[in-house]
Amino acid sequence: MTDTFVQAQAGWLSRVALAEKMIPLIGKLYRENNVVTSIHGKRLINLSAIEILQAHRYAQQVNDTELELEKTLPILERLVEMDLGTASIDVGQLAYRFDAEGGDLAAFLGRELGEVVGSSTETSGADIVLYGFGRIGRLLARILISHAGRGKGLRLRAVVVRKGSENDLEKRASLLKRDSVHGPFNGTITVDKENNTILANGTLIQVIYSNDPATVDYTQYGINDAIVVDNTGRWRDEEGLSQHLQSKGVKRVLLTAPGKGDLKNIVHGINHEGIEDTDRIISAASCTTNAITPVLKAINDRFGVEHGHVETVHSFTNDQNLIDNFHKGARRGRAATLNMVLTETGAAKAVSKALPEFAGKLTGNAIRVPTPDVSMAVLNLRLEKDATRDEVNDYLRQIALNSNLRQQIDYIESSEVVSNDFVGTTRAGIVDGLATIANGKNLVLYVWYDNEFGYSMQVVRIMELLGGVLPPVLPHRKQISEIA
């Protein structure tokens, strides 16, 4: 063997050893302090040593510099020694900041994380009921189970469905366990037919069979002041959704679809602060609205938007037909896996519900395409100020890295990525920097989004806010206005 081969192998094994040291530290922070650690939004909990190395490597895509384990390991070691309360802590950002500032690590972390130091008090958490168990419902369940920790945050207590067959419970559990798009469930699932429960990684989920959202008594299962997340899409206005509030044990209702009438449509990161204690029913808007609204706000704050058109290239959904058949919607009756289907979208109009300054400025259409997940929004905008491609990309990259919209907007520059590369992304939308077109006041942006998982993460953030268990995201980033 050549010296270079031996050196390369030794270097790799050394890095793996460092990553292995991190695993118990990451686990301890989560179990004992309810602290979620990440690197640029990529959660480190339950990752293997190789996956931790990949997360460090990913940092190079967004920050032009590969993150060294020698810089993150001391931070994790110090975090374990601190008396921390519930928080989401980006270890990568801490490493970059400390590298730039220098000095004493303990003092640095004390400054950056001061608001959660010494705040490790017990909280009661919030009970969650999933009404419906389709694509979004099962992904929400997976996320809630993975976030369960010590029960200080959101607690998935029950799932309400219509009984479809005698072996309904086993089928529901199987669909939770196996997913053709998002892969197998990470953990173990056990079914108790006698008690109608599913035990998933220590989370006991009561399966309730009901055809009427107004008659379920959740209190008989020990569920109180619950947030009912309606992901059926059957009711989208206040009158229909208020049926949930008639059931015992329900405090609030969250709709995972665009709300009609006067319902507040919330895009987390944009208008979530507008939720009031008196709002008992709210909507989490649509996946497309969540993907484009943060990007539109960022662009409007810096360059101003006079008007624009949004074209969504959207993966097919369950409301389309597999083969040609009758459908009440125009064109959606044609075979979803064989055709591009031109259809309507309310996302462009819905943006103004979260950003009133966009009222009347956007038009939109959608093209459903034969892919099962991950979509793209093409934003064709007329700006108030001239902008260059580099200026726009540099700005959006800083927004993704250093702003209060870092959970909503991601940024990537790669000539090789395709839609499948974004399955499972936790951000609402990912700007494809290489595709940006800017010519004076004309701007075209391409935004990828996982219309299932990325949207579900936005829904969870609203649930945490409604439940009073939204963890602070540290270290703090700048407001958009400070970057714009």
Image (cartoon, rainbow, N blue to C red):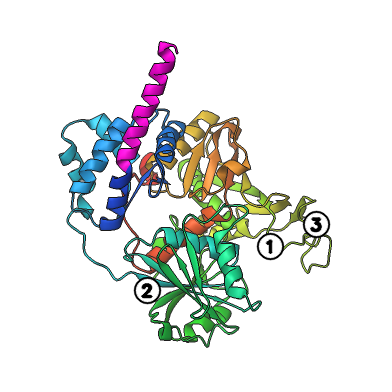
Say what secondary structure mark 2 lies in.
loop
Which residue is found at the position 21% from the left and 64% from the top?
121
Which residue is found at the position 38% from the left and 44% from the top?
403
Q: Majority secondary structure of the magenta segment?
A: helix
**What's the amino acid at mark 1?**
Asn
| Proximity of marks 1 and 2: CB atoms separated by less than 8 Å | no
Say what secondary structure mark 3 lies in.
loop
Q: Can you give x and y, in whole percent of width and height, for residue 392 in the image? A: 51, 35
Circle nearer the N terminus (3, 2): 2
Does residue 388 sit above or below 188 in this rendering? above
Q: Mark 1 points at which residue?
A: 318
In what quadrant of the picture does the C terminus appear? top left
Q: Give the range drawn in magenta.
A: 1-22
Which residue is found at the position 21% from the left and 60% from the top?
120
Tell whether position 46 is magenta.
Answer: no
* Disc 2 residue crowd, few under 14, some 14–19, many 20+, Cα 10 Å: few
Tell whether position 13 is magenta.
Answer: yes
Foreground residue among 221 and 356: 221
| Proximity of marks 3 and 2: CB atoms separated by less than 8 Å | no
* Disc 1 residue crowd, few under 14, some 14–19, many 20+, Cα 10 Å: few
Q: Name the residue under label 3.
A: 335
Closer to viewer: mark 3 or mark 2: 3
Q: Name the residue under label 2.
A: 277
Q: Can you give x and y, in whole percent of width and height, for residue 239 in the image? A: 56, 81
